[in-house]
Image (tube, rainbow, N blue to C red):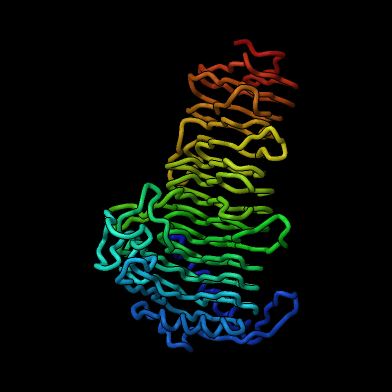
Amino acid sequence: MEKSHAFFVHSWVHCSIFFLFFCLADIKLVAGNGSEVVSDTFHIRDFGARGNGRDNCTAAFQQASEKLQQKGGVLIIDPGTYIVGKQFLSKAFGAGSSYLSEPILSFKRVRHPISIIGVGATIKAASGLKFGSFHPVTGKKDSLRKIGNRSDYYAAAFVFIDAEECTSVSVANLIMDGNSPNMDIGPAFDADGIQLMATGIRMYNNQKVNIEDCYIHHCGLDAIIIGWTGLKHTDPIYPHTIRNVRARYNGRQGISWVGGNHLSVTGSEFSSTGKAINNGKFVVSKPCAGIDIEIEDAIIKNGLFENCYVFDNTGPGLSSIGHDTYNINFKRDAFIGTTNSALYPKTQGLSFDSCLFVGKVERIFGSSDKTKAISFKNSLFTMQEGRSPNGKVFGDHCEFYEGVNVVFDNCEFDAAKRRLPVFNFREIVFKDCKFSQDNAADFKASATFMGTTTFDMKGPGKVDVTEATFQGQIIYNKRRVARISY
């Protein structure tokens, strides 16, 4: 599956070469004030990068960064495979790291638009980059860390594209290969794994970001990190857009959203997190999700994930824990859990419309404040193995505990040979929902059911209605009934 996807991405990028060359003659970008400006265009090969898949091109990318740092512009990554990533040993305690990674494409406070466009190009991390816990003097792997502070042993590997406090940053048509199977990985620092940089794209506190048509894979940490440190409700909207991005086989997340106002993610995939192999071991750090929404000294609001595909992650397909999240909507997305939950949405302000959930969904966020409780509409929850591309489905049932005022509107629950969801006493409202199961276990319907409720109990299991409230019609095994006996 990974090979076929890579073939598709390469083919698409190569087909776009001719289109891009026609467009490059007169590239115009939009400045922060909305005015249109003609930008200088540079080619990465102008700075000495060879793209032969052998020579390390870090210095060329650094020179290109310095050029764009001055007044922005367009950087064309010409056809080829560019090896990047260098580190040097600190040789002392107190430096804050053991191995320090050199920047690759790094920008800070650039007030003119920056655009990075690949033309049949792959950026690939060099083999042997250190990642994890290493002694700052000897350079050897060190799990004991007897001297100095914990940070003295940090070995971060790379960030391909890193931008902070810039006016506008665009990235398009690039393949980014983190090469995690060939990293030199040291011990983890705790049960959370290695929470250090080995990342495709890192964007913090930028006014406008656009990422599209990229394939980012095998990074030791995340494919993409989006953040805005210190963001408040009174701050302006800073739009970030991600389109047609594939993030696969990364170590911690496909995407981490840790702060921001107005993120739109469409037509993208976040799959196989924590499934890459290095020396017979998985490259994995918690929460190892497809999508992680978790604030870091900020708020998160006004998000849209539409037509996205989230499959086969070591952790939950979506992991969201905490508060200060507002108006985050998921539409027509597929979450397929094979080795962990499809969804772990334990935070306020989320809504799901016309989504598919295969496997366990758990810890839905409820609240006495109805505006904060999450909601589901027109969605299918299923345990059918045929709905999973690899035939694997995680969990025996969904767990909807702590779901005060959570509403399921026109949703279907298909437990197949497994069990229907379990939940607390009358916390949840189901409107016009359908339930089916082919199992001997009873379904304890401790909730409020409104509109038309349909039960299709194919096995010997029954519906326990002793703690149920019905406000509307009941259809039980294709027959309309006034009540259900238990």
Q: Position of residue 188 (x, y in %)?
A: 34, 54
**In the rendered view of the protein, which quadrant contains the C terminus?**
top right
Residue 179 visible at all: no
| Residue pictured at 57% horizontal, 61% vertical | 226
| Residue pictured at 37% horizontal, 68% vertical | 95
| Residue pictured at 65% horizontal, 23% vertical | 426
Q: Position of residue 439 (x, y in %)?
A: 49, 22
- Specify the farthest residue to the top: 485
Which quadrant would residue 6 be assigned to in this image? bottom left
Which quadrant would residue 104 be assigned to in this image? bottom left
| Number of marks in picture | 0
Q: Position of residue 2 (x, y in %)?
A: 42, 58
> Is residue 348 placed above or below 130 in the rendered structure?
above
Residue 357 visible at all: yes
Locate residue 235 relative to residue 187 in the image: left or right: right
Locate residue 85 relative to residue 363 in the image: left or right: left
Locate residue 346 relative to residue 91 in the image: left or right: right
Q: 292 and 217: which one is in front? A: 292
> Is residue 257 placed above or below 439 in the rendered structure?
below
Which quadrant would residue 177 be assigned to in this image? bottom left
Q: 186 and 480: which one is in front? A: 186
| Residue pictured at 43% horizontal, 88% vertical | 48
Locate residue 364 relative to residue 418 in the image: left or right: right
